């Protein structure tokens, strides 16, 4: 059976490049929506692709500065933005690899 290409899909060699290109291509578009609840008061915070890439880079750099480069790191937590941020920061590895500019 012949494979039919339905969509033109970009190929990335790493998650680093995926984050960089998403920040470049979609910059100010919303990547994540975080719900903040204080009693009955509910607010939503939009995280853009660009902000996510900056935060990934910042946290990754902080982890390196704290001596965690090339160390094994476990992340335990609920499925939420902060978990994704920590995971992306760890797998992006070295300083400035996920920088948007």
Image (cartoon, grey):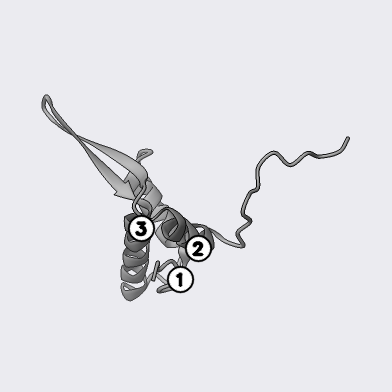
Closer to us: mark 1 or mark 3?
3
Q: Tell me if I can see residue 74 in this picture.
A: no
Residue 47, position in %: x, y?
A: 30, 48
Image quadrant where residue 64 sits: bottom left
Q: Nearer the viewer, residue 18 or 87?
A: 18
Q: Residues within 10 Å of mark 2 (few under 14, many from 20)?
A: many
Image quadrant where residue 63 sits: bottom left
Q: Earlier in the sequence, mark 3 or mark 2?
A: 2
Image position of 4 with respect to 89: above or below: above
Query: Under tag 1, what secondary structure?
Result: loop
Instruction: Check if mark 2's residue and mark 1's residue have beta carbons within 8 Å.
Output: yes
User: For the point 34% across and 52% down, which residue is it?
Assistant: 28
Closer to us: mark 3 or mark 2?
3
Q: Is residue 40 left or right of residue 21?
A: left
Instruction: Check if mark 3's residue and mark 2's residue have beta carbons within 8 Å.
Output: no
Image position of 40 with respect to 31: above or below: above
Q: Tell me if I can see residue 23 in this picture.
A: yes
Numbered label attached to residue 50? 3
Numbered label attached to residue 97? 1
Q: Residues within 10 Å of mark 3 (few under 14, many from 20)?
A: many
Residue that label 2 marks: 16
Q: Is residue 5 left or right of residue 82?
A: right
Q: Nearer the viewer, residue 53 or 30?
A: 30
User: For the point 60% across and 59% down, which residue is it?
Assistant: 12
Q: Earlier in the sequence, mark 2 or mark 1?
A: 2
Q: Earlier in the sequence, mark 1 or mark 3?
A: 3
Q: Residues within 10 Å of mark 1 (few under 14, many from 20)?
A: some
Query: Under tag 2, what secondary structure?
Result: helix
Residue 61, position in %: x, y?
A: 35, 71
User: For the point 40% across and 48% down, which residue is it?
Assistant: 84
Q: CA distance from mark 3 to mark 2?
A: 13 Å
Q: Nearer the viewer, residue 79 or 3?
A: 3
């Amino acid at each position: 059976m012949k494979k039919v290409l339905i969509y033109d899909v970009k190929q990335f060699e790493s998650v680093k490049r995926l984050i960089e290109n998403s920040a470049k291509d979609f910059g100010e578009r919303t990547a994540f929506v975080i719900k903040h609840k204080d009693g009955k008061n509910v607010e939503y915070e939009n995280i853009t692709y660009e902000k996510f890439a900056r935060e990934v880079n910042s946290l990754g750099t902080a982890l390196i500065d704290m001596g965690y480069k090339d160390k094994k790191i476990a992340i335990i937590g609920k499925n939420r933005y902060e978990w994704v941020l920590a995971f992306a920061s760890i797998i992006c590895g070295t300083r400035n690899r996920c920088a948007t500019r």
